[in-house]
Amino acid sequence: MKTTYPKKGEIIRTVYLADARDKVLGRAATRIASILKGKHKVDYSPHLDCGDGVIVLNADKVRITGKKLEQKEYKRFSGYPGGLKLEKLESLLKRKPTEPLRHAVWGMLPKNKLGRLMIKRLKLYTGDKHPHIAQKPKQLEV
């Protein structure tokens, strides 16, 4: 029996709608990353981009457990000497409310061309409204 792989034109993409209000950050991120990769599909292949799109509402109201608000730090490096920037989770939430969820999902995706294509299908919004009604998203429980 031969193994069959889906061709580029055979991949059917679905858009899912998730509400992240009062969901734990890491647990929501793992579910979203799994959908973006396509691991929920029967014809999943790790070397193909066969995942679906995810729209996340209330991404700023995700729950953070423990002392992460005061202790967790995000690092950026400009490439220049002395260019390391450290930012606490609390100040990052004030500056960019959806960034911690995006950062958590990106950490669970492959760091190559496939991962960059997958993260583009993640749409994060701070409120209850989104402009993707024409895609007819299916409800997703995270």
Image: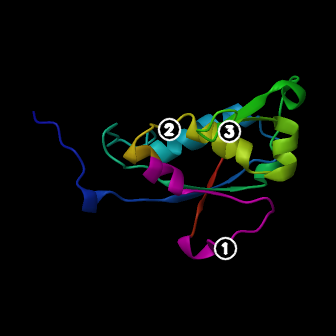
Q: What residue type is labelled 2?
A: Leu
Q: Which amino acid does label 1 sit on?
A: Pro
Nearest to N terminus: mark 2 or mark 3 = 3
30 lies above or below 36 = above
Q: Where is residue 79 in the image (x, y as percent from the top left)?
A: 58, 38
Q: What element carries label 3?
A: helix
Q: Considering depth in this image, is 118 or 75 the residue closer to the camera?
A: 75
Magenta part of the protein: which range? 116-135
Whether residue 20 sits left or right of residue 51 in the image: it is right
Whether residue 33 sits left or right of residue 44 in the image: it is right
Q: Is residue 117 magenta?
A: yes
Labels 2 and 3 touching (C-beta < 8 A): no
Return the mark for residue 109: 2
Whether residue 43 sits left or right of residue 35 in the image: it is left
Distance of label 3 from label 1 (alpha carbons): 22 Å
Say which residue appears at 45% left-offset and 44% top-offset: 115
> Which residue has dot 1 on it?
131
Labels 1 and 2 touching (C-beta < 8 A): no
User: Is disc 3 surrounded by few (<14), some (14 to 19) or many (20+) residues within 10 Å?
Assistant: many
> Which residue has dot 3 on it?
28
